[in-house]
């Protein structure tokens, strides 16, 4: 029975270690996902800036076309004024020219505004392109490093899994099944140390008769409170 208890203790040590390794893998996977996400975000950000720039350029071209059209209208109206016979018509055309010149001035202001916005946006695009280029250069190396760490952890998990298989083959199938069930129910800990009359798994006091039975190592004893399998560990003598 003592050999069986020793095997159960080793089994739990392996499983707890594998739990730590799998948590480390999750962290590494999260890091790799974060690296890829940062690159995607940078690309999307640059694409968004470029789309805004294209729209501003389109708006500027439309404003410039409107500006040119208004200048042509003014030119045409000024030519027509030379052929006007009545004062009333002359004043009407004059008002049209004045309104067109006002529109031209407003369009010029809007074009200048678009040019300023484009200059600022192009500066932002250049910065974004530089950041993206740096990310693209470093991402593969960083991802490769994280993948190497991930693979190393997997090797350790595989090695522990082999050790686990060796141990479980030496234990009765019903004991392994019970162990696995307890481990699932008790947050990964199926085996608990009994010391000084207490279960170290749940910190509850053990019945004296049950605790004394642990010294005999004649049977597999479980804690009546948490149902974990108990292994006796006495305090070392001072």
Image (cartoon, helix red, strand yellow):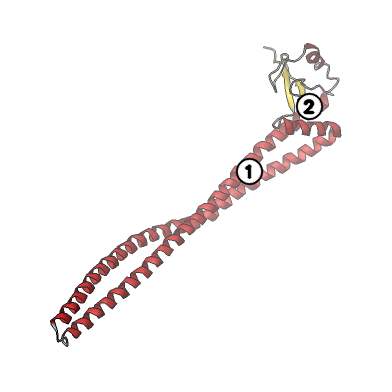
Identify the residue at image location x=78%, y=11%.
208
Residue at the outermost left position: 87
In the depicted structure, whether residue 19 falls above or below residue 68: above
Q: Is residue 175 left or right of residue 144?
A: right
* Circle 1 Cα neighbour tier, 10 Å, few/some/many (<14 / 14–19 / ≥20): many
Q: Of residues 189 and 65, which is closer to you in this image?
A: 65
User: What whole-number distance in Å separates the C-alpha atoms at marks 1 and 2?
Assistant: 29 Å
Answer with mark 1 or mark 2, whichever residue precedes in sequence: 2
Q: Write down the quadrant of residue 201 in the picture.
A: top right
Q: Quadrant of the N terminus?
A: top right
Of marks 1 and 2, the one in the foreground:
1
Q: Is residue 105 left or right of residue 236?
A: left
Give the image location of residue 110, x and y in percent.
29, 66
Find disc 2 in the rendering and name its residue. Answer: 6
Q: Write down the quadrant of residue 70 in the picture.
A: bottom left
Label drawn at residue 121: none
Q: Of residues 175 and 75, which is closer to you in this image?
A: 75
User: Element at badge 1?
Assistant: helix
User: Element at badge 2?
Assistant: helix
Identify the residue at image location x=68%, y=45%.
154
Q: Write down the quadrant of residue 111 in the picture.
A: bottom left
Mark 1 in CB contact with mark 2 (< 8 angstroms): no
Give the image location of residue 94, x and y in percent.
17, 77
Q: Is residue 221 left or right of residue 87?
A: right
Give the image location of residue 217, x and y in percent.
83, 19
Q: Quadrant of the C terminus?
A: top right
Q: Of residues 12 and 180, which is closer to you in this image?
A: 180
Count of numbered labels shown in the rendering: 2
Find disc 1 in the rendering and name its residue. Answer: 25
């Amino acid at each position: 029975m003592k050999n069986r208890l020793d095997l159960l203790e080793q089994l739990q040590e392996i499983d707890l270690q594998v739990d730590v390794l799998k948590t480390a893998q999750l962290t590494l996977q999260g890091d790799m996902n974060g690296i890829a996400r940062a690159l995607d975000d940078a690309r999307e950000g640059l694409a968004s800036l470029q789309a805004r720039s294209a729209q501003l350029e389109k708006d500027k071209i439309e404003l410039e076309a409107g500006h040119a059209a208004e200048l042509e209208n003014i030119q045409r109206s000024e030519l027509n004024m030379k052929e006007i016979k009545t004062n009333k018509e002359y004043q009407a055309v004059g008002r049209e020219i004045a309104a067109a010149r006002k529109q031209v001035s407003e369009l010029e202001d809007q074009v200048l505004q678009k040019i300023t916005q484009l200059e600022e946006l192009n500066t932002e695009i250049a910065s974004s392109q530089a950041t993206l280029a740096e990310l693209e250069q470093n991402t593969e190396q960083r991802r490769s490093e994280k993948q190497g760490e991930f693979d190393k952890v997997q090797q350790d998990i595989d090695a522990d899994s082999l050790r686990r298989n060796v141990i479980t083959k030496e234990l009765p199938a019903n004991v392994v099944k019970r162990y696995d069930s307890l481990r699932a129910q008790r947050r990964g800990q199926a085996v608990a140390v009994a010391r000084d009359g207490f279960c170290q798994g749940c910190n509850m006091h053990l019945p004296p008769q049950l605790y004394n039975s642990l010294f005999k190592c004649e049977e597999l004893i479980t804690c009546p409170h948490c149902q974990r399998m108990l292994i006796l560990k006495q305090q070392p003598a001072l």
